[in-house]
Amino acid sequence: MSIEKYDLAIIGSGSGNSLITPHWDDKKVAIIDSGVFGGTCLNVGCIPTKMFAYPSQLASNPADAARLGVDMDFRSADWPAIRDRIFSRIDAISDGGKQYRDVELDHTTLITEEVRFSGPKQLTTTSGRVLEAEQIVIAAGSRPSLPDVPGTTLPGVHTSDTVMRLEELPKRIIIVGGKYIGSEFAAIFAGLGSEVIQVNRSGQLLSSHDKTVSERFTRVAQEQWELALNRTLHSVETDGDQLRINVTATGQNSDDIVESFTGDVVLLATGRVPNTDRLNLEAADIDLAGDVIARDEYLRVLSNDHPLEDVWAIGDIANPQMLKHVANHEQRVVAHNLENPADMKSDTLGPVPAGVFTRPQISSTGLTEDEARAQFGQDAISVKIQDYGDTAYGWAMEDSHGFVKLIANNSTGLLLGAHIMGPEATNLLQPIIMAMSFGITAHQMARGQYWIHPAMAEVVENALLGLEVPDAGLL
């Protein structure tokens, strides 16, 4: 048996691709990915979805303008033009990255096959190639999770991996799922002119978010598209040239169909699962923490609760927070540790932020109100909800939905969580992330700097001032 020897083998070409720094220029590196080069975020995730979300937001402007006395018309969206603009750019980046690793660099070898562990430091591809490497980084990502019901493989049934490549804008789309992915696509398609029905198991959308966000967003979404709440998917079937989904009442008899919906397209947005089950991790005796790979503070994988030297894991396959900025940070940590084994850094960043690019936008970081009360005690925290509409720029927008919700520790004045819904929510969150990451108290943040008047950011300032926390002697 011929064994290919490498200094570094990387499973996955998303954030894992960035591990190949100049340090490896005189060494042999294998990058292994059976999917589209560049990973989830570039090809089917964050980047193309936001490139659809922006034109969808533009298409919704006439409704907002009408409230302010401005007459604007939205006639139609050219879906093929939008799609082709987006993917002509993305596909070129993916193809260019593949060409660079596969052809232009002599020290890297691109292997476009599935791979599985066949020993602690050994990998075997589908075709039988056997690879051994001094260092292995597992960055194999995640994939859409499909519900175990009949009809999910019918033509016209899509996941987030495929729905953005539709030939035309559907007249009527049924979206199953009420978290990040389902809610973003509901906003995208509704904004561009599709009739949308969003089916959700629970009574509220974004149910893992802070309860105020979940409650208010559900109400706003209901004004923009149809919701079928407390419904569980039973089956998908054809209905002439359309698709029909059958649903049951959540928590009731799973065979009692209570409702059916028909549409041109069905999008199953029911979560993602890490690709741990595809790697034969047992052959390397690698531990799991739930369904993700277990790691130590330096991001080395664990084997029987101990670090497995020279084997690392980053991104969705090892972190339930499936966010590109998390994977990128972990890539930087592992890149440093690979190159500096005597001076390794641990993964120590502060709270993880997240954005949902719905309409309106949503952003969050830290603890929810319920989590904070459970962790610190009912009376140990201060909560302030500041509506956009109670600030000067909110008046200019006549905003009736947006708000900033802050949660702080009563005794220290430190922020514990932040949740924002409204225009530019993801940008407004960033200074709060900075304060939480660097230990700046709520009052220091509010009164230790100027805030531009009458900018939208004043809604954050007013929320900070509304918290009942120590003022540290600042005016």
Image (tube, rainbow, N blue to C red):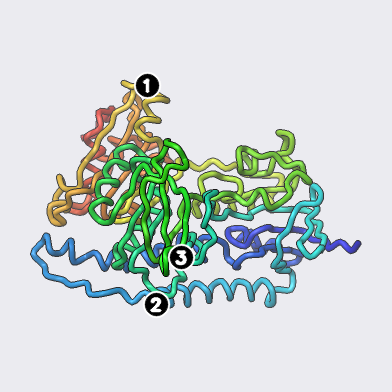
Helix, strand or loop at mark 3: helix
The answer for how far apart the CA atoms under marks 1 and 2 are is 53 Å
The type of residue carrying mark 2 is Pro
Tell me the tag on residue 163.
Answer: 3
Tell me the tag on residue 54.
Answer: none
Q: Nearer the viewer, residue 454 or 327?
A: 327
Position of 407 compared to 138: left or right?
Answer: left
Q: Quadrant of residue 404?
A: top left
The type of residue carrying mark 3 is Val
Badge 3 or badge 2: first in the primary sequence:
2
Q: Please state which of the two labelled residues, at mark 3 or mark 1, is closer to the viewer.
A: 3
> Which residue shows up at 28% across the image and 32% down it?
383
Disc 3 packing (10 Å; few <14; some 14–19; many ≥20) = some
> Which residue shows up at 29% across the image and 46% down it?
218
User: Which residue matches tag 1?
Assistant: 377
Helix, strand or loop at mark 2: helix
Disc 2 packing (10 Å; few <14; some 14–19; many ≥20) = some
Does residue 385 sit above or below 131 in this rendering?
above
User: Which residue matches tag 2?
Assistant: 80
Position of 16 compared to 392: left or right?
Answer: right
The answer for how far apart the CA atoms under marks 3 and 2 are is 13 Å
Helix, strand or loop at mark 1: loop
Position of 466 compared to 10: left or right?
Answer: left
Residue 146 at least partly seen: yes
The type of residue carrying mark 1 is Gly
Residue 242 placement (x, y as % from top left): 41, 66
> Which residue shows up at 83% across the image and 63% down it?
4
Residue 434 at least partly seen: no
